[in-house]
Image (spheres, rainbow, N blue to C red):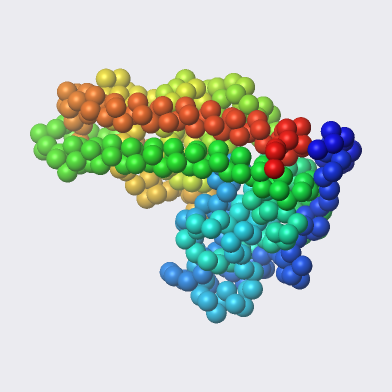
Amino acid sequence: MTGEWKETEIGRIPSEWNYGCLLDIASRDKKSIISGPFGSNISRKYFVDEGVPVIRGNNLSLDIGQPFIDNEFVYVTEEKAEELNTWAKVDDLVFTAAGTIGQVGIIGHRQKYETYIISNKQLRATVDSSKMLPIFAYYWFASNFMQRWIENCNTGSTIPLINLTVLKSLPVPIPPLPEQRAIASVLSSLDDKIDLLHRQNKTLETMAETLFRQWFVEEVDEEWEEGTLGDVIELIYGKGLKKEIRTGTGYPVIGSSGVVGYHSEFLVEGPGIVIGRKGTLGKVIYLWNNFFPIDTTYYVKSKVESAGLLYEYFLLKTLNFEEMNSDSAVPGLNRDLALSTEIRIAPLDRLKKFNQFCSPFIDKLRENTKQIHTLEKLRDTLLPKLMSGKVRMEF
């Protein structure tokens, strides 16, 4: 480690590091970097109930902590997959080509399937592991710096687009492999701890949800008051907040799928509840702290203050909002239909007892969530410094 630097298109990097583009670190295989098939070749008519999973935009994320969302697939037959020949396998990188460009994922070693097919709106790259570790490449291309870089490469007019030429030319620093391994190890360790805490939270939430179903669904008393969801809560429209004016730090910006960014101002004081209104229909999200729900969501305002947010949160999670779609093109949750849902309103003493019983679960959930945020902040602070060589790793 000489302490000397060289100037590159992405800024200063250590002089002993190499510098290139994605094409320079790609596998020697002639299909190492490919685009998805034409849309007409992978349309809905080819989907089957079981077979080879198709990677779409919903399987990728702008959240670096979600390298691959391994669910909600459509499938094609083995024969169709062979015909399309747009395979993706373990350690491959997948980029969104149309729509939310900047999304990138990596197929890990613990995924549900050995092979996938990419959709017509994805690009796939196979990295030469003798030049760059795939996980190091993932952290680089998924970084905030490269998300912004990719967004600036947009070639579309109405729908954001990137193509193979753009993908192949994406810049990348190339440290020695041992240093790549050390950097990736630090970042992966943080993400592994974050993942463990997320899984603990899922278990705690499942326990509380099971108790709710027992007390308020399975053991419902016919003498409880008949009412509607609208007797308990209001659903308030979120507010538009264009991506380009979000500051990137501060309070979480909440879309229909969850956190989609950060902003210096908040709209709603936490704790609070958000429901997906457009896109990811009916997803129920609990927020501990202040947040900014955008216009693809509703946020919840309580009508029965003594009921408590926990009761309202688990009540909402029992409802099937997908059946309340009011739009044909883009799924949309009909607010009037949702609020008119008939429910049995339990007596307040039972609601209070539920909140008290669940409070230890929720306290642990909150503690874990704080730790997750601390670790995410540490990772996000370290990542650009490690990737630029401003912080060096011993190896």
Depth order, front residue of 21/97: 21
- Which quadrant would residue 31 be assigned to in this image? bottom right
Depth order, front residue of 148/230: 148
181 shown above or below 376: below
Is residue 364 shown left or right of residue 219?
right
300 shown above or below 104: above
Image x and y of residue 249, in percent: 63, 26
- Which quadrant would residue 188 be assigned to in this image? top right
149 shown above or below 31: above
Image x and y of residue 35, in percent: 70, 64
Q: Residue extending furthest left?
A: 223
- Identify the residue at image location x=72%, y=54%: 132
Is residue 278 shown left or right of residue 230?
right
Image x and y of residue 146, in percent: 73, 42
Depth order, front residue of 64/256: 64
- Which quadrant would residue 215 be assigned to in this image? top left
249 shown above or below 103: above
Image x and y of residue 198, in percent: 44, 39
Is residue 278 shown left or right of residue 155?
left
Quadrant, the N terminus: top right
How many numbered discs sit on the rendered protein? 0
Quadrant, the C terminus: top right
